[in-house]
Image (tube, grey):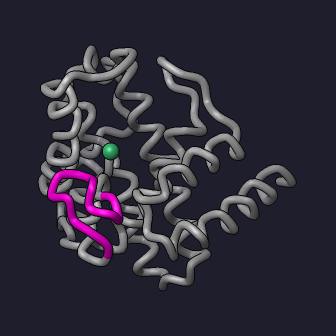
């Protein structure tokens, strides 16, 4: 009997580790932000779906990392940081193992930690060298990580998170982050009134 794409990605299976459920919830959240942000920017339905598909898989490779290192409070040493950074490779490999992997989805996953100024990883790509899907996910990922409760930290408010993002704008595409600030205030208004 075949397994659905969602099952093969690890959704809906009993979680052995608390970190797995956090990772999966984060991927879902980033998938939703990515979809509505990309729609707001004006991408086609097909592009939006591909960005979303990358977003819901972007961090699944964290389930292949050592949870003790992922949950370690405080700063990581160089070796631990390298171990965590390798989650982009694990996420990529998981996506390759799925049926019909799509190149644009794979590259969005692989490069989602590249920073616009070339200080990210794994390849220190700069500006438009970074695939557009990865640039969108970078912003949505950052925002969700700050505004969601984790087992090791409390969620920030939107305004606290946006302040941090403004202080770290080197990470983001300058055109996209300007649009994101407008988008997220509308998104929050719509969700408050829903
Ligand atoms: Fe990540």
Q: Quadrant of ligand 1?
A: top left
Magenta-highlighted stretch: main secondary structure? loop
Q: Nearer the viewer, residue 139 or 22?
A: 139
Q: Nearer the viewer, residue 7 or 126?
A: 126
- Asked whether the viewer can see residue 165, the reply is yes
Q: Residue at x 39, y 52 (%)?
A: 56
Give the magenta range. Answer: 115-127
Q: Residue at x 22, y 51 (%)?
A: 121
Q: Is residue 43 above or below residue 29?
A: below
On the image, the x and y values in percent for residue 45 come to 48, 81
Q: Is residue 192 magenta?
A: no
Q: Is residue 128 above or below residue 107?
A: below
Quadrant position of residue 85? top left
Quadrant position of residue 133? bottom left
Q: Residue at x 49, y 71 (%)?
A: 174
Q: Is residue 85 above or below residue 77?
A: below
Residue 111 lies left or right of residue 172; in this view the side is left
Q: Residue at x 79, y 59 (%)?
A: 190
Q: Is residue 194 above or below residue 60?
A: below
On the image, the x and y values in percent for residue 16 come to 31, 18
């Amino acid at each position: 009997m075949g397994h659905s794409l969602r099952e093969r990605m690890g959704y809906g299976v009993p979680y052995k580790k608390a970190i797995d459920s956090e990772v999966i919830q984060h991927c879902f959240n980033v998938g939703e932000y990515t979809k509505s942000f990309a729609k707001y920017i004006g991408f086609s339905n097909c592009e939006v779906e591909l960005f979303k598909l990358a977003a819901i898989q972007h961090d699944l490779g964290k389930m292949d990392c050592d949870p003790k290192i992922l949950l370690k409070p405080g700063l990581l040493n160089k070796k631990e940081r390298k171990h965590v950074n390798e989650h982009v490779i694990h996420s990529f490999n998981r996506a390759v193992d799925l049926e019909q992997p799509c190149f644009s989805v794979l590259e969005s996953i692989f490069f989602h930690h590249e920073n616009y100024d070339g200080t990210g990883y794994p390849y220190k790509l700069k500006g438009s060298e970074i695939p557009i899907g990865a640039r969108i996910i970078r912003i949505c990922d950052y925002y969700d990580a700050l505004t969601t409760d984790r087992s090791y930290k409390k969620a920030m408010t939107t305004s606290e998170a946006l302040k941090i993002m403004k202080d770290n704008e080197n990470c983001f595409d300058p055109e996209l982050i300007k649009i994101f600030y407008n988008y997220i205030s509308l998104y929050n208004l719509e969700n408050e009134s829903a």
